[in-house]
Amino acid sequence: MMKLINLKTNESLLEDVRMATSFWDRCKGLLGTSEIQKNHGLWINPCRSIHTFFMKYPIDVIFFDKKLRVTRVVENAVPWRLVILQTLHTRSCIEMKSGHLGGRVKPGDKFELRD
């Protein structure tokens, strides 16, 4: 179980981050799930863009560069949408329950994953 820590505030944004690093785990993402629990997230690495085709619920997404600095924040990505890369520096993303971010994360914020 990994925690996502905002280094600016030293607060935990997510308490349980699951990794999707294999090709199939990255392709599947959250597809087939009926919801994601509050304080849980899925880190997709590598990943430069996502889609919400076939999703059953909206999600919040944070995109990161290779140093886990935020490159883009997408709140309430509804089903049947495509979220395309906005910067060439993007390397990964974390998907979480819609409404969880609540404006607390901005591009440039630095994060860390901790055990």
Image (spheres, rainbow, N blue to C red):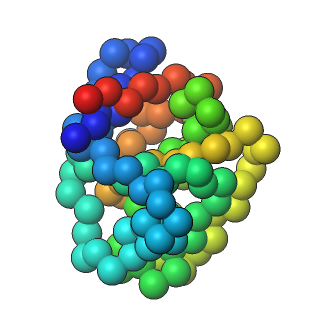
In the picture, the quarter occupied by the C terminus is top left
Quadrant position of the N terminus in the picture: top left
Q: Residue furthest bottom?
A: 54
Q: Quadrant of residue 13?
A: top left
Report the front residue among 34 and 67.
67
Q: Decide if residue 9 is on the left or right side of residue 109.
A: left
Q: Which image quadrant is residue 60 in?
A: bottom left
Q: How many marks?
A: 0
- Along the horizontal axis of the image, is 90 left or right of 11? right
Q: Position of residue 96 (x, y in %)?
A: 36, 53
Residue 39 seen:
yes
Looking at this view, is 46 or 57 the one in front?
A: 46
Q: Residue at x 64, y 44 (%)?
A: 91
- Is residue 31 depicted above or below 4 in this figure? below
Q: Is residue 4 left or right of residue 110?
A: left
**Horizontal side of residue 25 vs 48, given as left or right:** left
Give how far across and how far down residue 90 sits, in percent.
67, 43
Q: Write the residue at 52% across / 80% down.
A: 53
Residue 61 visible at all: no
Above/below status of 57 relative to 77:
below
- List the single residue furthest toward the front: 22
Residue at figure coordinates x 63%, y 71% from the top left: 82
Q: Residue 12: x and y, percent?
A: 28, 28
Q: Position of residue 20 (x, y in %)?
A: 42, 56
Residue located 62% across and 33% down the image: 66
